[in-house]
Amino acid sequence: MNHLKFLCLLCLGLFVCTGLSAQSVKGQNVKYVKYTGADSGSFGQTGPKKWAEYKTRSGSKALASFTEVNRDEWSVYLRKSDGLQIQLDLWTKTVKWSGKDQYNITESSLNNPNVGPPPSIVTVYADGYFKGASQSFGVGSHDMHTLRTVGNDRISSIKIKPGYTVIAYSDAGYRGQSRTYTKDVDFTSDFNDVISSIKVVQGGVAPPPPPPPPTSTNKNWMGKLPDDLSVAAISVPGTHDSGADYGSGDPFTKPFAQCQDWTVSQQLNTGVRYLDVRCRRSGNVFTIHHGAFYQKKNFGDILNDCRNFLRANPSETIFMRIKQEHTAADNSMAFKDIFNRYKANYPGIWYTGSTVPNLRQARGKIIILDNASLGMGLNYGNQSNQDKYNTGDVNYKWSQIEAQLNAAKNGSKSKLYLNHVSATAPKQLKTPRDMAEACNPKVNNYLSVRGEGRFGIIIMDFPSTNLINKIIASNKGAKAAPKVKATYRVEIDACHDDLTGTGTNGRITVEFYAGSSMVGGKYRDGPGDNCISSDDAYSITTDRAITHILVRTNSGDGYYIDELRMFRNGTLVQHHGRDNGSGWCVSTDANDAHGDWKGKVAGGACQSAVRFNY
């Protein structure tokens, strides 16, 4: 070892070797110098760019004020309001008065002893709501050993002066899990009694990175549920403002504009099956917004994610609330017209029925929840919905969530129960993440106690994988409702007082359908030219819900139906047409609609099969 290095190591604690310690007092960090000469006194920094001169005979009373003009490696340059210039030169250890050596510097320091400790920026409390033992801190890092008064793993609430940020850590040495607070916290919730070290910084800090997507996914959990199970009988994980994973580019508005950490694709892979999609009209497209804040994506991006997911996982279904958000851009198309363009560009993935489907009908599709007057899908406003979103009162919000969870568990399994866990209160500086961190664990605890059951669609900001798994697990014992058989009867009237030849020699078949599946059919041969009266009935008994029938023939000898009645268990449920009115021609020969039937046949031509909805 050379002599210089040896001397440096020996003298490390005394900072003899230049640059070995950040604590070396130099021009860049000095805050106090003491001087002697014809007079004695000191200069000390009192604030940003502010200095004062103190005379020994006056104690700590400042006699003159100076403005810091500049610093370099060894000096600080000060100026008085009357133009007097001072250089505190630590290299020559002199105080220069207008360029001339005036005093000798005898001491220099990183702190000004004439100024008391800075006012407390942060106060931590051992109990919630700012009660119990307390301890205050200024800007800086405060490890576990500094928490002597309040105690390690004891912090339950924190007061923070505006403009400052606290980063709390679960372990000593600023390690482990962390939470970032920018305003008073009356209860640290999931971080209660776990904090072992804190950092206090001025201004904001970059938010912690979003939690990673889960390593094990729930891509096809619906595939384990029975086909005949109503989608309303399932507990479904959902997200509020599903596209709001960007928030905004402004660090002050971002905490209020962001609702999710994960993209829509990541949400679906994690098990989320309800999406809340907020669309702003912009020309002939939808941009995704949270209020006024554009989320850096369009509706097509979300539909691409959904279509790709459903193609890869055809056993699944996605509920999609579609809502108009923010004001439309100038010269925009009507909302419904823009949506219909998207619908046409993404064929085959929509469930547009107005009744709640079962899983067989919904697999591989997006179930529309219409919150924008689209005129298709399930009406969002007709569902049972808890959405007390404008509150920062955690106890009140939880009372609403819990009541809806109980209602879903005990209510009709044919009705959708929507339960928004999400909330925010900007006036109280309660962000969506604040409310999620308080309310999501309460839902988790509730489900842990209740176990299996139907708890509705649970709509969350920043859901954890653990909570999503808990919601999915509650479906473990889900079973389709017991199948009940019903008798479906169809009566056909082909007698018309003003027309001739309304009968047929051909075979008449009535096919009964449940969705796209034919459940069964009944047929008989026609009576020739004699008309077919309303006592010509066809019936079937089944435990499948019949949605429509097809009336068809295999003959070019057409017949004319002016009235058709449809019954379920003896009760008339549909009545198509009227006696002696306009009707339908059933024939393999489209030209059978000519002659005296002309002008009476729907569509002006015969069809080999005519559909009638139940």
Image (spheres, helix red, strand yellow):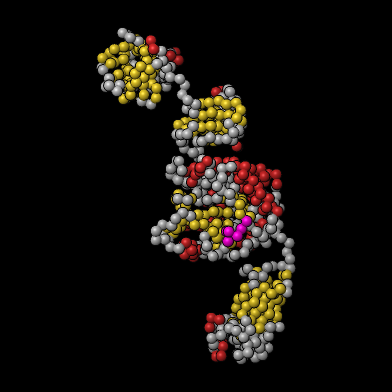
Q: Position of residue 442 (x, y in %)?
A: 64, 43
Asked whether residue 346 is in view, the answer is yes
Of 407 and 437, nearer the camera is 407
Tell me: residue 12, above or below residue 128.
above
Tell me: residue 485, above or below residue 311.
below
Query: Which residue lies most toward the left here?
Result: 99
Residue occupying image coordinates x 52% and y 62%: 373
Of 572 and 115, nearer the camera is 115
Q: Which residues are magenta?
A: 379-384
Q: Position of residue 225 (x, y in %)?
A: 66, 56
Query: Which residue lies most toward the top here?
Result: 38
The quarter of the image holding the C terminus is bottom right
Residue occupying image coordinates x 33% and y 13%: 93
Q: Quadrant of residue 506 in the image?
A: bottom right
Asked whether residue 17 is in view, the answer is no
Residue occupying image coordinates x 33% and y 9%: 39
